[in-house]
Image: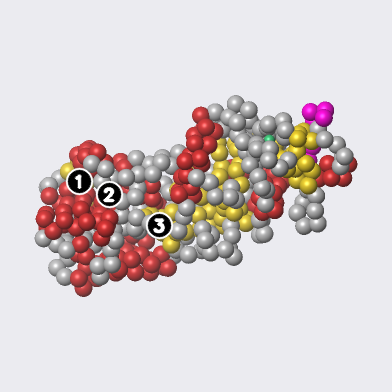
């Protein structure tokens, strides 16, 4: 920790203590136990609990990366005259955010999360903050050199479950993102999830902004990312893999049976109109080619269908636990929102159109292509419409 209490109950920075008050006694502002001032050649001064004195509020050890990052955030907020407080202890919540700002509306807590944290703990702390009217910002380090869990500028996202749980909704765009801090380049990275392509993987895109060019306000409305050709390339590779049968059949065995029974179609021939990543789909585990095929078969079966009927049949799937979602307290998604997004994409593809405001119907030809080559061709035709739709969605 960077701040401790003196004998006179005053808060003091470790930097200051190292220069002026080396021989004083210091105490943890959260648990009131003795702490030691630590100084060294490489790491800047900090306070640490005495060995074997557990502090439940302030967990250690503290890394140079964490210290550097929270000071960077503190300085950044301080320059904006937001009166940030470093490591302020919030007794009612028993939490101690790295930086707290009481002056923002609502008050904000900034957590520079360098160590792994369980999904449950992150969610619990997020909900606690929100219940007290505090907006939490989970910020993760950019670790380019490290392969595991790194934010790589690859079109495919590999994320930890706690990164998923900390996703936030852009205040204008119908899309979710995470915040990363590059302490070497003094920049924020915003990682947008473009949609789920399998039960494990999502497509992603980034925007990057230097701290000095950004105000606090833009953490809720960061710069938009660009949808590039490499997103299209990767997406087509995935579709190809699926059509050649390299699908995780263990998870999709029910779906396989459904296609065979209802349409006499193998899994690899799923409709070209299905399998499209959508930003709101990232909080649902179900692969897009599965739920989109189920939805399309409902629409196709009837001459016209209302949105209400569709959501009702999806509620039934949810009740059968065929539809699994992940809780994202900062970016809640209902499947009504998601269906809406998919319906818009299908309209762009000229596959459905509205017969009146609430009712729409299938406009395309057959749901299934006649053979595999045809399916590849149809995927290729539709991928540009998907790209255009995504570009519009994120602009
Ligand atoms: Zn303590």
Q: CA gap, disc 2 to disc 1?
A: 9 Å
Magenta residues, as a range?
A: 7-14
Q: CA gap, disc 3 to disc 2?
A: 20 Å
Crowd rating for badge 1 (residues with CA inside 10 Å; few <14, some 14–19, many 20+): many
Give the number of the mark in front: 2 or 1: 2
Q: Position of residue 151 (x, y in %)?
A: 53, 59
Give the number of the mark in front: 3 or 2: 3
Task: Work out which quarter of the rendered image holds the N terminus and state it.
Answer: top right
Q: Residue 362: in sight, yes or no?
A: no
Q: In the orientation shown, which residue stands out farthest toward the front?
A: 52
Left or right of 71 on screen, residue 343: left
Residue at mark 3? 202
Where 228 sits versus 53, above or below? below
User: Going from the N terminus, do you reach mark 3 or mark 2 first?
Assistant: 3
Residue at mark 1? 360
* Circles 1 and 3: CB atoms closer than 8 Å: no
Residue under the image location 16 percent in, 54 percent down: 258
Which secondary structure lies at badge 3? Answer: strand
């Amino acid at each position: 920790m960077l701040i401790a209490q003196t004998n006179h109950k005053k808060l003091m920075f470790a930097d200051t203590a190292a220069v002026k008050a080396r021989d004083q006694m210091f105490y943890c502002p959260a648990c009131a136990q003795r702490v030691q001032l630590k100084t060294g050649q490489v790491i800047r001064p900090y306070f640490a609990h005495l060995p074997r004195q557990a502090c439940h509020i302030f967990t250690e050890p503290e890394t140079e990366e964490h210290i550097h990052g929270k000071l960077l955030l503190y300085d950044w907020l301080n320059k904006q005259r937001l009166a940030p407080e470093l490591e302020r202890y919030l007794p009612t919540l028993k939490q101690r955010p790295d930086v707290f700002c009481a002056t923002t509306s609502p008050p904000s807590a900034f957590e520079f999360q360098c160590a792994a944290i369980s999904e449950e703990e992150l969610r619990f702390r997020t909900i606690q903050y929100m219940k007290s009217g505090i907006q939490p910002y989970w910020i993760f380090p950019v670790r380019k050199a490290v392969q595991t869990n790194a934010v790589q500028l690859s079109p495919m996202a590999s994320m930890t479950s706690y990164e998923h749980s900390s996703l936030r909704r852009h205040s204008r765009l119908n899309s979710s993102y995470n915040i990363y801090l590059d302490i070497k380049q003094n920049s924020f990275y915003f990682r947008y999830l473009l949609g789920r392509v399998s039960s494990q993987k999502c497509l992603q895109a980034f925007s990057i902004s230097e701290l000095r060019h950004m105000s606090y306000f833009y953490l809720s409305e960061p710069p938009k990312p660009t949808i590039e050709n490499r997103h299209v390339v990767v997406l087509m590779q995935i579709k190809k893999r699926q059509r050649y049968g390299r699908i995780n059949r263990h998870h999709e065995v029910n779906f396989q049976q459904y296609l065979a029974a209802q349409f006499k179609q193998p899994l690899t021939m799923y409709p070209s109109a299905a399998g499209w990543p959508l930003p709101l789909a990232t909080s649902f585990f179900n692969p897009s080619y599965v739920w989109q095929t189920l939805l399309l078969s409902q629409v196709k079966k009837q001459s016209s269908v209302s949105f209400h009927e569709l959501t009702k049949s999806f509620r039934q799937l949810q009740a059968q636990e065929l539809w699994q979602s992940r809780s994202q307290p900062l970016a809640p998604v209902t499947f009504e929102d998601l269906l809406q997004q998919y319906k818009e994409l299908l309209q762009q593809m000229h596959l459905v159109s509205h017969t009146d405001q609430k009712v729409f119907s299938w406009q395309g030809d057959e749901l299934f292509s006649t053979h595999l080559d045809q399916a590849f061709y149809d995927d290729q035709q539709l991928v540009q419409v998907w790209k255009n739709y995504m570009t519009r969605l994120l602009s």
